[in-house]
Image: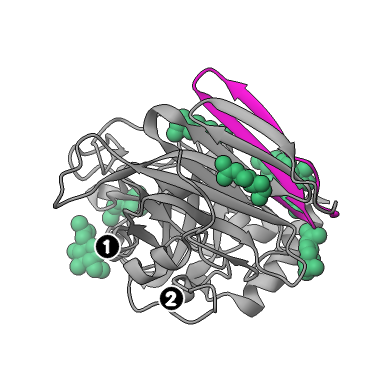
Amino acid sequence: MMLRLLLILAVTSLIQAAPNERFVEETSPSNVYRVVEGPLTWNDAKAKCEAMDCKLAQPKSVQANDALKALLVKGYYWLGITDLNHEGRFTYYTDDQDIVYDNWNAGVPNNGNGTEHCANVILHSTFNYSTWFTSNCSEVNEGGICECRTSGASGDPHMRTFDGRAYTFQGICWYTLFKDCTDKSRFDVTIMFEPREDSTPDQVRTRTIAFNVTVGNQYAIVNGLDVTTGSTGGKMTDAKVITIQQEDKNIKLHFTSKNTTFSFNWTLRLHALDVSYNGSFYKGKLCGLMGNADGDTRNDFQNPDRSIAKDVLEFGESWKVNDKKCF
Ligand SMILES: *[C@@H]1O[C@H](CO)[C@@H](O)[C@H](O)[C@H]1NC(C)=O
Ligand SMILES: *[C@@H]1O[C@H](CO)[C@@H](O)[C@H](O)[C@H]1NC(C)=O
Ligand SMILES: *[C@@H]1O[C@H](CO)[C@@H](O)[C@H](O)[C@H]1NC(C)=O
Ligand SMILES: *[C@@H]1O[C@H](CO)[C@@H](O)[C@H](O)[C@H]1NC(C)=O
Ligand SMILES: *[C@@H]1O[C@H](CO)[C@@H](O)[C@H](O)[C@H]1NC(C)=O
Ligand SMILES: *[C@@H]1O[C@H](CO)[C@@H](O)[C@H](O)[C@H]1NC(C)=O
Ligand SMILES: *[C@@H]1O[C@H](CO)[C@@H](O)[C@H](O)[C@H]1NC(C)=O
């Protein structure tokens, strides 16, 4: 079943998506891996990842490293691990901490006579293979693997669309985070931003305090850590019910529509709402602040009438929900 899914994804991604737009999700912690295609040196790959507001990948668990296999690429891809700072001791390039997990091939790292300072992973989807090697950092690999935060709203709020486009938006009140934009809309997710205490009249800074998930005739409002559920009185659809789990200061919520499960991870302390999904039915069929999820970042800023917004402000404000009162 899993293999079948991978094959289906392999075929569709080869046909539809540009190679550097493929991504997979690591299960825990929730990161997204994206491929940047080369040929690229280690520095080129690092620069490409950083340009997307990501870093060169640093898989820290067997689950994370296994997730790379689902990228469905074949060849050598750079990782964010080097011994450039201390020969023979491999660390994460972002903080120079010793690596906590590795998947070195037998006999690696072997110093390469002092010439191989950058780690790469050989990925071969057909053989379900993700083993690490080292190379001369100036050599070119097939590409690199970037590690990005998951999509959603966090902090200021800093937004990230399903396709990975990052932006800052300081609207106040309720906005459509994303919704089913097909003719038969089955779900709708709105989010509320309020000004932070440190806002000034010149510079408003906001944060997320609530969101409202409506699926079929059921809704769930999460406000801080209070959850209210109810019925809209509208029609039932074939979308599946919302499930909610609360753990300490963290709320997880899921719902399914068609072959797609949407997962929310709300961390009140960080005012961060991460959203991810797995099936393919809704690719290109969503709209709202998180874009259309078609794998192309360039068309993410679409207004409700599908025109491309001229800037972030126009885009953000076009998704304001006018009939909703703020708390
Ligand atoms: C790939 O290997 C992992 C473990 O390394 C395993 O969990 C997974 O089922 C394998 N996938 C396929 C498609 O064989
Ligand atoms: C949810 O988010 C928190 C904080 O960002 C993170 O520590 C946790 O691993 C996330 N959980 C899942 C299942 O993604
Ligand atoms: C190191 O250099 C020696 C002599 O040139 C060569 O035989 C050996 O294969 C090299 N080792 C590696 C790991 O490249
Ligand atoms: C790495 O490769 C480059 C290009 O092939 C070469 O010029 C350089 O000398 C090599 N560096 C080391 C440390 O061997
Ligand atoms: C949440 O959504 C439901 C259904 O769309 C709506 O009836 C309700 O008023 C919303 N609540 C808030 C606080 O926005
Ligand atoms: C999506 O995730 C859900 C929940 O983890 C799972 O039951 C479902 O089979 C997954 N669907 C696909 C298409 O991977
Ligand atoms: C999900 O639905 C889409 C569109 O109907 C279909 O192309 C795709 O094969 C489905 N994927 C799975 C894993 O069922």
Beta carbon of the mark 2 residue lies under 8 A of ligand 7: no
The amino acid marked with disc number 2 is Arg
Identify the residue shown where x is 52% and y is 55%. Answer: 177
- Does residue 162 show up magenta in the picture? no
- Mark yes or no: residue 150 visible: no
Residue 291 location, x and y as percent?
A: 51, 65
Identify the residue shown where x is 38% and y is 32%. Answer: 270
Identify the residue shown where x is 70% and y is 55%. Answer: 187
Identify the residue shown where x is 84% and y is 51%. Answer: 1
Q: Is residue 292 above or below residue 250?
A: below
Beta carbon of the mark 1 residue lies under 8 A of ligand 4: no
Locate residue 285: give its quadrant.
bottom right
Bounds of the magenta span? 237-262
Q: Is residue 21 above or below residue 88?
A: below
- Mark yes or no: residue 38 visible: yes
Q: Secondary structure at mark 2?
A: helix
Q: Viewed as shown, does residue 140 lie left or right of 34?
A: left
The amino acid marked with disc number 1 is Ala
Residue labelled with disc 1: 47
Residue labelled with disc 2: 298
- Does residue 254 show up magenta in the picture? yes
Residue 84 location, x and y as percent?
A: 21, 45
* Outermost top residue: 248
